[in-house]
Image (spheres, rainbow, N blue to C red):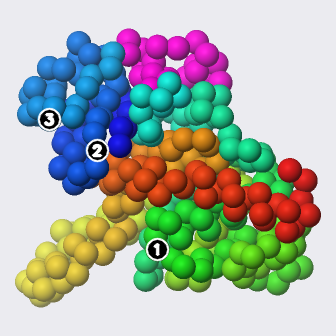
Amino acid sequence: MRLAVDVMGGDHGPAELLHGIQLGLAAEPTLKTIYVVGRESEVRPLADQVGLEDPRVEFFDASEVLTMEDDPASAVRRKKNSSLNQALTLVSDGKADAAISSGNTGALVAGASFRLGRLDGIKRPSLACIMPSRTGAFVLLDGGANPECTPEILLQFAVMGSVYSKAMLGIQKPRVGVLSNGSELSKGTDLTRHAVDLIRKTSLNSIGYCEGFDLFTDGVDVAVCDGFVGNLVLKTSEGLGKTVGHLMRAELLEHPSLLRKLGALLASGGLRRIKARLNPETYGGAPILGLHRTVIKIHGSARREALKHAILQGSKAVLGNLSGEIEREVAAAMTAAGAEV
């Protein structure tokens, strides 16, 4: 197992991600090599500082960095020696089995699609986001890669999400729902209604529509939508989680009565477990599904634990041949639905 990790795109700098590589190497015995991709003159001294001395680490120099301000399409072409591009090149050249980056999402999707290619029959790759629910987790896709979709594309997202949920989350028969503004099939748009019709013709465990409140209350395992809606859901839920945490801290600090302090102390264990469940770093990153190789996007603000889990996630996807399974299942679903490939 060989992974290429772009360490230049994160908000907290390469050192934090180098710590994550340390944790990933310790947790995943199948790893043969991790290519640390970035400005070598900057990264090597930081690796020495954090004590990253594992013989499985190889440094791969990349002189440029793609920033969040760069236009995705032009930057991929213009900054050919960026750490993001070079990590993908290691995969396309067969030197690495998967790539992980916290860089520009649009550039990563565009670069991965161009360099690695889409699986046969796949119309668009999808950003699959794993999110917590009341009893476990669900997959939301698309998380922002495709703001405009057709019903056939949503059908393929449904299949990719179902395959991912089985393989990575262990859900044997994932419930697949198209995100809409009501459960009645008269609701939604022409896009969502047609997508539900196509999905119901396949062997997927379709529940028709799912609503916003189904997402976090264990009402669905795979929630399907276009990237415009999906990104709004993703960012809104992240903002709500941070706000709830802020309000709880404010209540305890602004009114620090003895009774509240005692209550906080008694509840601290449970609160820590809830925080861990809601922490997106627990789930690693968002894979870009539908490509010939595994690519995982971690958040720009990701810290070491997120990268550790992304490394475990990438290893599991490669070892389980996730891409091959997606290709087979999408082909079967498109045939069953009578959809145009």
Q: Earlier in the sequence, mark 3 or mark 2?
A: 2
Are there few (<14), some (14-19), or many (20+) residues within 10 Å of tag 3?
few
Q: Is residue 256 left or right of residue 130?
A: left
Q: Earlier in the sequence, mark 1 or mark 2?
A: 2
Name the image quarter holding the N terminus.
top left
Residue at 58% x, 21% y is 76
Find disc 2 in the rendering and name its residue.
31
Q: Secondary structure at mark 1?
A: loop
Please identify the quarter of the rendering in which residue 178 is found.
bottom right
Q: Is residue 127 left or right of residue 179?
A: left
Label 3 – label 2 distance at C-alpha = 11 Å
Q: Is residue 84 left or right of residue 109?
A: left
In contact (CB < 8 Å): disc 3 and disc 1: no
- Location of residue 317 with respect to 120 vertically, above or below: below
Residue at 14% x, 20% y is 45
Three-letter code for the amino acid on which mark 2 is drawn: Leu
Find disc 1 in the rendering and name its residue.
170
Residue at 14% x, 35% y is 54
Residue 131, given in percent of the width and then of the height, sits at 48, 66
Three-letter code for the amino acid on which mark 3 is drawn: Asp
Find disc 3 in the rendering and name its residue.
54
Tell me the tag on residue 38. none
Residue 180, given in percent of the width and then of the height, sits at 74, 71
The residue nearer to you, when weighing 338 against 68, is 338
Label 3 – label 1 distance at C-alpha = 32 Å
Q: Secondary structure at mark 2?
A: loop
Label 1 – label 2 distance at C-alpha = 22 Å
The residue nearer to you, when weighing 247 against 63, is 63
Three-letter code for the amino acid on which mark 1 is drawn: Gly
The residue nearer to you, when weighing 53 against 192, is 53
What span is colored magenta in the figure? 62-90
